[in-house]
Amino acid sequence: MATVDVIKCCHDSIRQASENIKDAIVYLDAGSAESFQFLGAFPLLLELGARAICSLESMSVVDKVVDWNTCSDPATKIVVITSRLLSDAHRYVLRCLSTLQNVGCCAVYTSISEVAHSAYPDSPLGPDAFREYESLLNQDYEELVKKHERPRTVPDDSGLKEGTASEAEGWSELTEIDDHSSIDYGISNAKLRGEDYFSGYPEDVGQKLVVSVHHFPLILCPLSPRVFVLPSEGSTAEASLSTEHESSISFGLPPLSTGKLADTEDVSPGANLTAQFLYHLASKMDLKLEIFSLGDLSKNVGKLMTDMSSLYDVGRRKRSAGLLLIDRTLDLLTPCCHGDSLVDRMFSSLPRMQPISSLSQSKGSQSQLKIAPLKVERARLSVQIPLEKYIVEEDTECNFQLLENIEAFLSGWNTFKSDAPSVDFMRFRKKLNDESCFQRTESKLLHGSFVSTDNFRGAPYLEAILDRRTKDGAMLIKKWLQECLRQENITSNVKTRPGLASKSELQSLLRSLAKRQSSLVKNKGIIQLAAATVHALDESHSASWDAFSSAEKILHVNAADTSQSLAAQISDLINKTVLAASQGQKHNATGKSQGLFTLEDALLLTVIGYILAGENFPTSGSGGPFSWQEEHFMKEAIVDAILENPTASRLKFFHGLSEDLEGKIKSNEKKEDPSGHSDGLDFDDDQWDSWGDEDADKDTSKDGAYGDMQLKLELRDRVDNLFKFLHKLSGMKGHSSLREGMSALDSRRNDDPSSTKGLLHKILTNVLDHNEIPGMEYHSSTVGRLFKSGFGRFGLGQAKPSLSEHNVILIFVIGGINAVEVREVQEAVARSSRPDIEVLLGGTTFLTPDDMRELLFGDYSHI
């Protein structure tokens, strides 16, 4: 029987669009570009006949001259693939049509279905969304061309703003950040700049421009053939998962489970889009789903999916599979902790590319966060691996030659405006020898990113290390590097130790393999992954991760003891931030001191401590797991930490007080400054005016004391609200039946090390052992409901199915997953007696501890 492979399924879906892709310029928005990077789909698009693959948000007039197929005729077709709503992508699609000449056919592929478009709040499109958008795009394009026919000038975004539909109609206008009219693209073609720019437009736009809109649901980021997340800048991942009410903790996370299902009309936009995505994913993979859910939002998503099913869907010959939907809020501990995972370390240490959506919101204020439906900005999966830092050796001729060749290649785009017949390579060498320019050029020219399909002997690199611990993953990469060196006949003088893979060994092997340009290009997959490993193992990153891991282990140990010891440990971690801040101020240092935590770090550890306390001491206090006195010490520690270094915090509950606190710190510094005017020799006129007034000094001191006291009282009120938020997190398992069910999962394997594992491992282990999962709800299909309500009267009722009956199980975590959970799922499958079981794991996004801290305390928090 064929195995389930999401990468292969996505490739097959792209091939189905080959007719439109052939001889077309393909434009990908940020979300689909991120997806196609992990899919390795760029060579496939070129294989299908695409002339060029370009960025939708960063399109320019030079896109038309880039032609990999070297066709002589100008391009007349464009294909736009977007992971966003059509209304969000409209401004970019319209700009493509207004900039490129001779476009007679435009095919738009969106990952959002027609039903999802019509159900999305404030959407301008109705049930027949695709046909409506075809006519609206034609209409806006025709109006835009007519506006430019009279002046016959180069189009800019100001004209585009006038030509597009108004905001009242639901369409997004181009912001100033999208203004490309002033950029010189290096093409000296008169038609691109002169008065005949619009001569290429068809006379009859309504008849010549053919617009077609298609549904392309499989835009996802596969970390392996059986592990995937949604693209960070897609509408589904960005959509809010909860509204602000008492059981919500963040817009980017499901609400806490209370046992009360919301009306399907009132569910969050993220629930609707997630249900649509999973329904069409199963359809594309020819899977007939039996849906199970755990958590309030998951139950709503499951209900939406069953409502979308029909007799035709259920009766078709499809492979049976079980879908388990789980709310992330049922287990916040696992993504908050710094587990033993090499991939998690990589994603946490490597710099991420800045989301394009954040650029358009950069000029907005916090009021944009209140616009409904809210969009949550996720951290991009596209990382920037600093290859130049690990493969470029100092003072070597070959590396200068490599960088010169790369820059010479890029400078070829500007040869149209160059009068010299050849490029001055000595100018490049001079630039590279300049240290500041060298660093700036390197960061732009030599960086890599993860690709799921790069493989070694048929095994994808990323898949092989996804479920590996840090030590095991580093050893595997070391073996790959040594094997590649043998295949390339490259001798390396690196002395390696068996059983260990240090940073210095990996970097030496990496430089040996990348010394030749041919070897660098041929083995780019393993080189990029090895550079990311070296970066993650660097002391500047590994020290912080190891410190977090040690602190979390101490919290686990104290949680098994008493609430007093756990509270004392949390207070000690917070007090260390005060020490770090005072030491940093003494040495005029900014940032985090080695071995010590910042306030944000301590608060994340406080969250972990409260979650552990909620599991171990649920009845210790009236409002939370700790007593009043224990919480009082923690609150005072946080207040002192904020007063000591207010600039270190960017948390939501802190907004509005930062300026006052910074002003207080500055005033204290002036008072304590020995070089100030404390010697009494320099007097101001105001001092002479108040001379002889006995109450002058007293009033000033009173005002200062009153201001300090009021500031401290306000700060304590904010901290009180913070601890009310922590109380919610400590009781996040929700209503009594679900809490009892989670406790039952823990007690079942009391004598097993898996009792310390995450929720996914516990659930899957019990499922494969044919144990019932308390609180799990089964969503009956259309046929099942028919048997239950109708034929059941005649004894033809259908027995409730079990998730363990299926050979294919798809687990989707609404809110996100991390690499530790991938390993734990694999371990649960390996220890079972089901070698034929196939488990797919998916999530809204890929979570790191920093992402969780931002969701819980950042701008999207409901604190």
Image: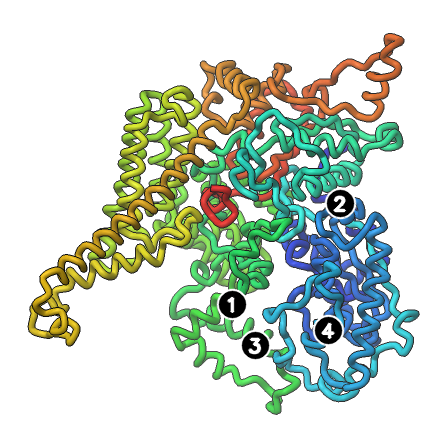
Q: Quadrant of residue 773?
A: top right
Mark seen at residue 408: 3
Q: Position of residue 677 (x, y in %)?
A: 12, 69
Mark seen at residue 597: none
Q: Earlier in the sequence, mark 3 or mark 4?
A: 4
Cα separation, mark 1 vs mark 3, equals: 14 Å
Q: Amino acid at mark 3?
A: Ala
Q: Earlier in the sequence, mark 4 or mark 2?
A: 2
Q: Amino acid at mark 4?
A: Glu
Cα separation, mark 4 vs mark 2, equals: 28 Å
Quick one: SS at disc 3?
helix
Task: Assign the N terminus to one quadrant of the image.
Answer: top right
Label 1 crowd bin: few (<14), some (14–19), many (20+), radius 10 Å = few
Q: Earlier in the sequence, mark 2 or mark 3?
A: 2
Q: Is residue 77 left or right of residue 744?
A: right
Q: Which mark is in front, 2 or 3?
A: 2
Q: Is residue 146 left or right of residue 836?
A: right
Can you see residue 489? no
Question: In the image shown, does 503 or 776 lie closer to the viewer?
Answer: 776
Cα separation, mark 2 vs mark 3, equals: 51 Å
Q: Is residue 764 above or below residue 380?
A: above
Residue receiving disc 1? 444
At horizontal 46% and vertical 63% (from top left) the residue drawn is 388
Q: Earlier in the sequence, mark 4 or mark 1?
A: 4
Residue receiving disc 2? 119
Q: Quadrant of residue 668?
A: bottom left
Q: Amino acid at mark 1?
A: Lys
Question: Is mark 2 in CB contact (under 8 Å) with mark 3?
Answer: no
Quick one: SS at disc 1?
helix
Label 3 crowd bin: few (<14), some (14–19), many (20+), radius 10 Å = some
